[in-house]
Image (cartoon, grey):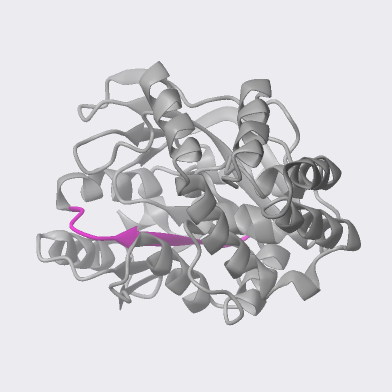
Amino acid sequence: MMSDTSPSSERPEICILLAVYQGAPYLQTQLNSFVAQTHRNWSLIVSDDGSSDDSPAILERFRQAHGTHRINLLQGPGKGFARNFLFLLRKTPPETAFAALSDQDDIWFPHKLDRAVRLLSELPPGQPGLYCARTMICAENLAPIGLSQQFRHAPDFRNALVQSIGGGNTMVLNHAALALVQETLDETTAPVAHDWWLYQIITGCGGQVIYDPEPILSYRQHGDNQIGANLSLRAKLLRFLALAQGRFQDWNEIGLEALEKSAHRFTPQARETLDHYKAARSGPILQRLKSLKASGAYRQSAAGTIALYIACLLNRI
């Protein structure tokens, strides 16, 4: 009933940004997890990228049941998931206190929004803040597989250059981070992934990324969604092969192009890091290694950082 889910004036409103495409098999359970949130003062913007299944009907029924005034259904750009999320960020009202990104096939734990808002509210006023967290990786039937990887080094631009640590499905931005992102949207080209770009932009501009070691949602694995299967040795080998074969280099090229147009907003330290890292991508071997070391770029594991230097030796970054 509406009395169970109506917004409360005692808590800041959170705008949930839900990207949808052919999500009918799992969409209703995700929507139900929004209703089950302990933080009930939320609104929802949905961008449907042209679904031909029952997704539009499911969304309209949900809108009618839970408030047409708080749920906005949009037609997406039809250019893939990263562009869809950037579109949603652009459409978020600029006065929004917090914005939470959502995939269509997860199930949020009831405390997800409350926990993110509490941690972000501890930041100094006006500081851009991005919350991200671990997830419980589940099979299609929601049987638990295991927790996503726990990262132990502090989030930092030097890490963001070479690694994405926060899944977009866990991310929540505070008002200052949203304002920063909306200012940069017109500057950026399409990044490899929206969540990696958010990590880079916010840390590059002096914002704070909060990495929560506690899982806050069930991340469902199915035929169309196997990104989360990063726990296996095979997945780690595939990532190393991607690096050695130059795909990491291709991702870097796209990512650096997306960052460069907003680099005038970076802190001096981030700008220096970026310049050193770019220098590590060309030139004689020793000069490349020297530039990479000067950049301070690191991955979250020792093996990952070693692999980064091997890629530099092979001129694959």
Position above or below: 129 against 56:
above
Residue 274 located left or right of residue 103 = right
Residue at position x 32%, y 26% in the image: 138
Q: Residue 313 appears in which quarter of the rendering?
A: top right
Residue at position x 80%, y 66% in the image: 266
Residue 201 located left or right of residue 18 = right
Count every numbered label the image shows and give the total.
0
Residue at position x 67%, y 30% in the image: 305
Give the residue at the far bottom of this rendering. Answer: 186
Magenta region: which residues? Answer: 10-23
Position above or below: 245 against 151:
below
Q: Residue 242 appears in which quarter of the rendering?
A: top left
Residue 39 located left or right of residue 104 = right
Say whether residue 206 is visible: no
Position above or below: 224 against 52:
above
User: Is residue 12 a member of the stretch shown in magenta?
Assistant: yes
Report x, y in % for residue 65. 25, 62
Residue at position x 19%, y 38% in the image: 223
Viewer-proximal residue, 271 or 137? Answer: 271
Give the residue at the far left of this rendering. Answer: 53
Give the residue at the far front of this rendering. Answer: 284
